[in-house]
Amino acid sequence: MPENMAIASVSSQKVSKNKRKKSSVSVSKTSHSRATVRRGKRTRRRRVAPKPRYAYPLDFFMWREPDFDQSPLNEEAAYKMRSAFGCGTASMFMPIDLVRAGTFVYYPLKGGIFKRREQVKYIVVHSTETGIPLNAKRVIDSWSSGGRRHPGAQFVVDRDGIVYMAVSPEYATVHVNIFKTLPGINNDNTVGIEMVHAGSQVYTNEQRASVVRLVSYLQDRFHVGDENIITHKYAQQGDHTDPVNFDWTGFLAIKNDFHKKAKETMQAAVASTHQEEATMTVDNASQIPASSVYLDIHRDLGKSQDIGLRKEIEVEPDVIQQFTKGEVQDKKLVPASTIVPIMTPSK
Ligand SMILES: [Zn+2]
């Protein structure tokens, strides 16, 4: 679950000294108390509800992320991109490309967004744990209703396996309480994934399969090691328990297996491209740049300054087609989570 307290806790000494004075004056007129406050040489007693104190100032947050082209890609390119996502080989595509391909449903968060000040280092998996069952859109709506400063996460995976992108992961949201996380884990260097789950609900296979793919994609996209795929429970030890009732060990086993196979597929694609290049003559080399462009794109991903930034190279649909050639099994459009079946845990 996201962090209400993350933005309203612990101290920021700068929080409106003026306001504090005012409130202490008015409070002292109307009440007596046990709390003692030392200010200079004077000691006063007063009773005050703890003031909300914020991890980030209000003007730190953006109301919305900048516009981007959301127009759907042509059917074939879109299908192939979804297929690549389904196979775990979509890391050269930007998240906003995957919106255009229909892999992610963009359901924009209003407020609660800020610019990352660090590179993505961790992926944090949560469960929403709303009091009553709420679908992904309602969860995002509930965050957005909090004004300019509120919790949120980049992705919400609904129970039917649909992946909602609330904001591109190049932007940060408040999904962990930076005053309670393990050292080095914060909102600037994490991407949050919320699984829709409440009470005794059981995670669905579609949901689990989508989270496997999403984690695998983000992991490759942002170069996050297996050891940095963590739960909120781990990030905030003793403070949070989500994802609740989720078989994390089983999930990691499936995710690692999926990720490993995807890497092998990628390596095979790269190897066959090398072979293809080796047999090219100088004359025809310029005719088929697509797979080379794919490789160039991939090499670019290794440069840290390119990661997650929207300015990076736009992917041409024919590159997409070239890359995913041979991986499309079916022309029928199906949700990303079902393109390649994933074995579900036996337990
Ligand atoms: Zn959480």
Image: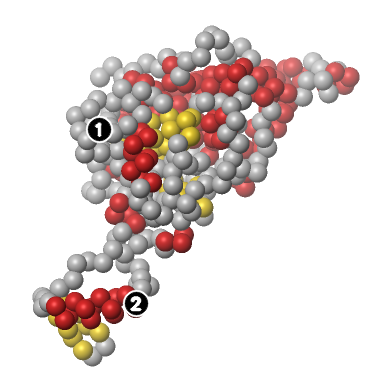
Q: Is disc 1 placed on a helix, strand or loop? A: loop
How many numbered discs, if any? 2
Q: Amino acid at mark 1?
A: Pro
Q: Residue at x 58, y 14 (%)?
A: 327
- Which residue is the site of mark 2? 17
Q: Position of residue 48 (x, y in %)?
A: 18, 71
Mark 2 and mark 1: Cα distance apart in space: 41 Å
Q: Quadrant of residue 284?
A: top right
Q: Residue at x 38, y 24 (%)?
A: 161
Q: Position of residue 105 (x, y in %)?
A: 47, 30
Q: Is residue 169 above or below residue 76?
A: below
Q: Does the beta carbon of the residue at mark 1 sit less than 8 Å from ligand 1?
A: no
Q: Is residue 30 above or below residue 225?
A: below
Q: Amino acid at mark 2?
A: Lys
Question: Which of the pair 16/26 is nearer the observer?
Answer: 26
Q: Is residue 146 left or right of residue 238?
A: right
- Give me the disc on residue 133: 1
